[in-house]
Image (cartoon, helix red, strand yellow):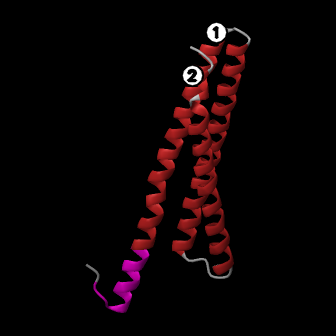
Amino acid sequence: MNLTTPALLFPAISLLLLAYTNRFIVLAQLIRHLHSQNQENLTDVVIRQIANLGLRITLIRRMQAMGVLSFLFCALSMFLIFVDMLRSAEYVFGASIFLLVISLIFSLYEILISTKAIEIELEDIQNHAKRQGSRLP
């Protein structure tokens, strides 16, 4: 293993952290919007959406934490290579990859949960259509 091996992960981890941050920002804006729009009249749908969003925020925080730790371990492995501690560098780099995989698993779980939010919206639309007497395909 040489110095360029862990350096290859730097752009990938950086892009993942950027994507995670963007997801967090979008969710935070959605939560603020739901809060301001529904302060006095919390319907069942809004309450279910807020619970879903809370879980997703928690997962994104974990995704970010694992991503940052992966980035730090990757940098540490580069330092260990630089000071010629190759065996330690290999273990630390392995831990970096492991943390990155954990981050990606959290990301996958968050994506699966995000579809639940859409299902809640669709259910509400269908219920509203039934009350109106409309038929949806």
Crowding at mark 2 (Cα within 10 Å: few <14, some 14-19, many 20+): few
Please state which of residues 73 and 66 is positioned toward the viewer in this rendering: 73
**Which residue appears at 72% of the width and 19% of the height?**
79
Q: Which mark is residue 5?
A: 2
**Which residue appears at 59% of the width and 56% of the height?**
23
Please state which of residues 50 and 87 is positioned toward the viewer in this rendering: 87
Please state which of residues 62 and 5 is positioned toward the viewer in this rendering: 5
Q: Quadrant of the N terminus?
A: top right
For numbered disc 1, what is the local secondary structure? helix
The CA span between labels 2 and 1 is 12 Å
Mark 2 or mark 1: name the one nearer the start of the chain: 2
User: Would you identify the image quadrant in which residue 131 lies?
Assistant: bottom left
Q: For the residue marked with disc 1, what is the amino acid?
A: Leu
Q: Does the magenta stretch include residue 130?
A: yes
Residue 8 drawn at (x, y percent): 56, 29
Tell me which secondary structure the magenta stretch mostly adopts.
helix
Q: Is residue 3 above or below residue 15?
A: above
Q: In which quarter of the image is the C terminus?
A: bottom left
**Which residue appears at 66% of the width and 40% of the height?**
65
Q: Which mark is residue 22?
A: none
For this view, does 113 lie left or right of residue 89? Answer: left
Q: What stretch is highlighted in magenta?
A: 123-135
Residue 45 drawn at (x, y percent): 51, 73
Q: Which mark is residue 86?
A: 1
- Mark 1 and mark 2 in contact (Cβ < 8 Å)? no
**Which residue appears at 58% of the width and 51% of the height?**
19
